[in-house]
Structures are given as C-alpha cells and as structure tokens.
Amino acid sequence: MNRHPKALALVGSARKHGNTSRLVDEVLRGFVELGGSAEKVYLSDYSIRHCLGCPCYVWKPKRPCIQTDDLAKLGNLMEPAQLILISTPIYWYGPSGLFKNFLDRWIGLPTSVFEKSHVAAVLTMQDTTPDTAGPTEEMLRRSFTGGAWITYEGSLLASGLHHTPDAITSHPQQLDEGYQFGRSLAEKLR
C-alpha cells in the first residue's frame, strides 16, 4: 500500500470538543504514531444542503451534484486520503442529522474521490446497550461493503458516555481502544 498513508477525519458532531471529537483525536494519534498523516475537519464548519434526489449518480457519465454548496470542498479534502474516518454520535438509534445529511450527499461526489479509499467509523453514544448502535452500524456496513469502489474497515463504538461533552475522559479504556484502532488502521494501510 502506502508507507505514509493519509487519513481525513470527518467529525459529524456539533460539539467540536465533545466525546466524538476526543475519541477521533485518539484514533488519529495512533494512526500518526505509525507514520501516517492526518487531518480533522468538522462537518459543522461546512454548508451541506439536503439531498434533492437528483439522478446525478445514475447519469452516464456520472455528473456532479447540481447543488452549489461546500460538498465539493469536502470532496477535494477526501480525494488524497487513503483513509476516510467518519464519526458521529448516536441519536435515537441513528447518526446525527449533520452526519446523515452529509452521507446522503456523498453519492454526488466524483468517483475519483473514492478510488483508493478505505472508510472506518467512530461512533459514540450515551446508552450502554450495544444494540442501540446497531442500526447505525448496519447502515454504515451496508453503505460501504459489497462494492469495488471503497473498502470498509469497520467501526469503533464508545458507549455509556452520558450527556456531558467530556464524559469520555472518564473512560480511559475507551480512549485506549481508539488509539489502538488508529494504529491497526495505519498498519493495514502501510
């Protein structure tokens, strides 16, 4: 693969210093320690409109999304990355609206964005019941497996974090799991 893989983390939480972002930091720390490079962006810093259901992805040849917003900027950041680390808190058994809105529009990005990409997910939630994350994990697995265009490397879930944005700091084992997840992703891509 690549001796110095690049990761781009897309944080789908409105809290820039919350549990999801802090766990992503640990994943990226592990990734970088094994020689990778990393960049983290917050979806909340970008204007991403709702999908209008245009057939951009079925046209031959594929056409860009008809909307003019920041999706193309995100695509430009994603294209050179070998790893796209997506992250979201779990709300009502699903991803945040911010993340889901981005995922709905993902199909409008040029195919070249994904030609060499691997995707992994970082999920956080208040609940302690792993089944609560099941619908989101299933959605991501189905979205990123079975095609030749991208490789899904799985997900990391941190649960029992309550409502406070710094709850994960009281869970050093989950932070270490994030660090180890990042190292394992770097190993796969080297």
Image (tube, grey):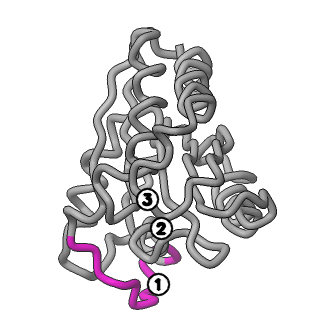
Kindly state the secondary structure of the residue where label 1 is placed. Answer: loop
Please report the residue visible at 55 percent of the width from the left and 69 percent of the height from the top. 95
Looking at the rendered structure, the kind of residue marked 1 is Pro
Kindly state the secondary structure of the residue where label 3 is placed. Answer: loop
Please report the residue visible at 38 percent of the width from the left and 50 percent of the height from the top. 10
Looking at the rendered structure, the kind of residue marked 2 is Leu
Please report the residue visible at 78 percent of the width from the left and 57 percent of the height from the top. 130
Kindly state the secondary structure of the residue where label 2 is placed. Answer: helix
From the image, state whether disc 3 or disc 1 is nearer to you. Answer: 3
Residue 61 seen by the camera: no
- According to the picture, the residue beneath numbered tag 3 turns out to be 164
Task: Relative to 123, say whether 188 is above or below.
Answer: above
- According to the picture, the residue beneath numbered tag 1 turns out to be 55
Q: Specify the label residue 103 is tagged with.
A: 2
- The x and y percentages for residue 183 are 55, 18
Counting residues from the start of the chain, the first of labels 3 and 1 encountered is: 1
Q: Tell whether position 10 is magenta.
A: no
